[in-house]
Image (cartoon, rainbow, N blue to C red):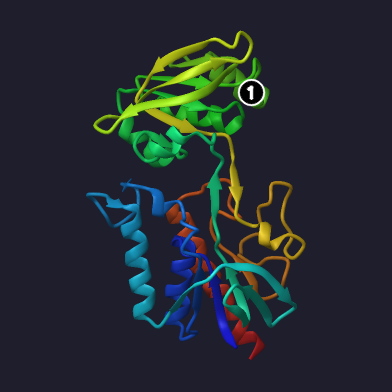
Amino acid sequence: MQKVTIIGHGPAGLTAAIYSARAGLEPLVLSSSAELGQLDQTTDVENFPGFPEGIMGPDIIVNMHKQAERFGAKFKASHVSEITGSGPYTLKTESGDIETETVIVATGAKPRRLGLESEQKYWGQGVTACAVCDGFFYKDLEIVVIGGGDSACEEAIYLTKFASKVTLIHRRDKLRASKVMADKVIAHPQVDILWNKNVKEILGNEDDGVTGAILTDSVTNEDSTLNFSGFFLSIGHLPNTDFLDGFLDRDEEGYVIVQSGSTKTSKEGIFSAGDLSDKVYRQAITAAGQGCMSAIDAERYIAEKE
């Protein structure tokens, strides 16, 4: 019987592992080798505290893993397909069942993608889904934002702090964003909007990364080429919570619902940390903070039970 089992190997799960290991709870961290988190696929990270020269995303994960292991955390590459029970809980994995008093779920979320081969090819080399993370790299360059909701409009306006020009590309002739936000982005002098356009292919090369894209007009079906240096996706995120369907309370988008001011979920002894319950900030540092919170919540829960 495990005291604490953590599902996820990102900044939330690994911070939870560090804190619970230092509390003497000997946590078990589960993750599938096929389930890479967003930091594992991120190159330069310049906004994580403590690294004034920046650091590679995978290096943050490796360092956190080593730190948790140093304090006694155990790791196992295993995919969790289901959680059952009412405390203690049973985690169903391909390598057998795991019994545990508490669970910290930190499986994160992934950005929605267009599904293009060129999108995957240039991911991290001009293609990104985080304006806050990567906007700084595009000072005085032309960039595009893909999307038409509030988030896309907010990111387009935010990116005008850095880019010389921002083009918002939307597949329809009307933004899905709220009227206030739509009016704001339409009126912004540094933002152009291309209506009724779908991205057919992202263009680039090994030396420069992204250099532009081929767009298809959804009305005329004609192709055109647009040159730019940065491609920002803002078409939503998908929380990795399908395996929790019917078990934990989730909202209409699939995000795990937690109690205000804590990481407690709808099930006693199960806690949620990181992007699977955070649709606002979605940063490595906020995920790490929630990982810390979840470990403390789990430790207090165990102490009260004992």
Local crowd size for mark 1, using a 10 Å CA cut-off: few (<14), some (14–19), many (≥20): few
Give the structural element (helix, strand or loop) at label 1.
Answer: helix
The residue closer to the viewer here, 8 or 101, is 8
Name the image quarter holding the C terminus.
Answer: bottom right
Total marks drawn? 1
Q: Is residue 305 left or right of residue 222?
A: right
Give residue 115's position: percent from left, percent from top: 54, 36
Q: Position of residue 72 (x, y in %)?
A: 40, 83
Residue 202 x %, y %: 43, 27
Q: Amino acid at mark 1?
A: Val
Q: Is residue 2 visible?
A: yes
Please identify the quadrant where the N terminus is shown: bottom right
Q: Residue at left 34%, top 64%?
A: 62
Answer whether residue 259 is visible to the viewer in this image. no
Percent position of residue 233, x then y: 50, 33
Q: Is residue 212 above or below residue 284?
A: above
Residue in view at x 72 percent, y 74 percent: 84
Q: Residue at x 34, y 73 (%)?
A: 67
Could you say which is closer to the camera, residue 138 or residue 280?
138
Q: Is residue 71 above or below residue 81?
A: below
Pick the residue in front: 8 or 270: 8
Position of 144 relative to 257 (above/below): above
Residue at the location (58% across, 76% down)? 298
Q: Outermost residue toward the bottom?
A: 306
Quadrant in the rendering for residue 85: bottom right
Q: Find disc 1 in the rendering and name its residue.
A: 180
Which sits in the foreground, 132 or 248?
248
